[in-house]
Structures are given as C-alpha cells and as structure tokens.
Amino acid sequence: MIKQTRIRNIIGSLMFATALTAAPAAVAQAHQQHGASAATSSPMDMKSMMKEMNDKMNSMPMTGKPDIDFAMMMRVHHQGAIHMAEAELKAGKEPEMRKMAQKVIAAQKKEIAELDKFLAKHGHPAEKK
C-alpha cells in the first residue's frame, strides 16, 4: 500500500512537471497558429529560436574532421544569433539592445562569410538558408 501511494505521488509529480514545461511551448504554438509573429508575441519565441537552432545542430551529420565539423556547427549557431537579433530589431524598444542586435547581425554575417569560404575551400559548400 505504501509503495503504491509513493508511486502514485511520483507519477502525479511527473505529470504536473510535464504540464508545466509543456505550457510555454503550447502558448508559443498557439501564437503562431493565430498569426502572431515570432518577434511580437512572447519571450518564449527566443527559446523557440534556440530550440530550432539546437535541433538543427543536433541532427547535423558529423564528418569526423574537427575543423569542418566546427565550421558547420558555428555557421548554424551564428545564423541562430542573427535570427534572434532580427527579432530584437522587430520588437525591441531599448536603444542599447537594438544597437547590440545590429552589431550582432553585422559580426555574425561577417563570420558566416568566413566559415562559408573555409567550407567551400575544403569541399563543403554552405547550405542555403
């Protein structure tokens, strides 16, 4: 009897925790389904951008060549930073953060161009967006 009660409590706690962590994703999905843009809804959209970037990086096949793998991963990572900075420019109000977003976009685009050049030189042309 004690074991069953303990198991029910654990299962109940896990279900509650799952509901809490799923709620922000459901809210973000509802915003997207109802036409709200990523830049104008909630801060959770930044997390969605990060998740998308991380998912892309996690699914990327590795070559086993550290320099190539690094360049490919950093390219995706930098593109993610650009997406987040663009969202800041669309929705952000603070001049300091908007200026930072502009700097991020410029710097990341420059580094992506360098990564693309390296990858092309080594037989790995950059993928299209």
Image (cartoon, rainbow, N blue to C red):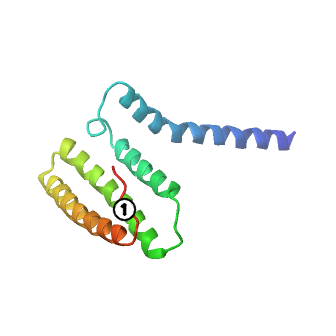
- Residue furthest to the right in view is 1
Q: What's the residue at 18%, 47% (across, down)?
A: 89
Q: Which of these two is toward me, 122 or 1?
A: 122
Q: Which of these two is toward me, 92 or 55?
A: 55
- Residue furthest to the top in view is 34
Up-down: is 76 above or below 119?
Answer: above
Q: Hey, what amino acid is under mark 1? A: Pro
Which x, y percent locates residue 104? Answer: 22, 60
Q: Secondary structure at mark 1?
A: loop
Q: What's the residue at 23%, 48% (across, down)?
A: 86
Q: Which of these two is toward me, 96 or 53?
A: 53
| Left or right position of 61 against 92 | right
Which x, y percent locates residue 57? Answer: 46, 57
Q: What's the residue at 26%, 36% (across, down)?
A: 40
- Where on the picture, by quarter, is residue 54? bottom left
Which x, y percent locates residue 36? Answer: 30, 30
The mark total stands at 1
Q: Which of these two is toward me, 38 or 114?
A: 114
- Where on the picture, by quarter, is residue 31? top left
| Left or right position of 79 against 6 | left
Up-down: is 109 above or below 68?
Answer: above
Which x, y percent locates residue 125? Answer: 36, 62
Q: Quadrant of the N terminus?
A: top right
Q: Which residue is mark 1?
A: 125
Up-down: is 80 above or below 124?
Answer: above
Pointer 1 local density, CA inside 10 Å: few below 14, some 14–19, many at least 20: some
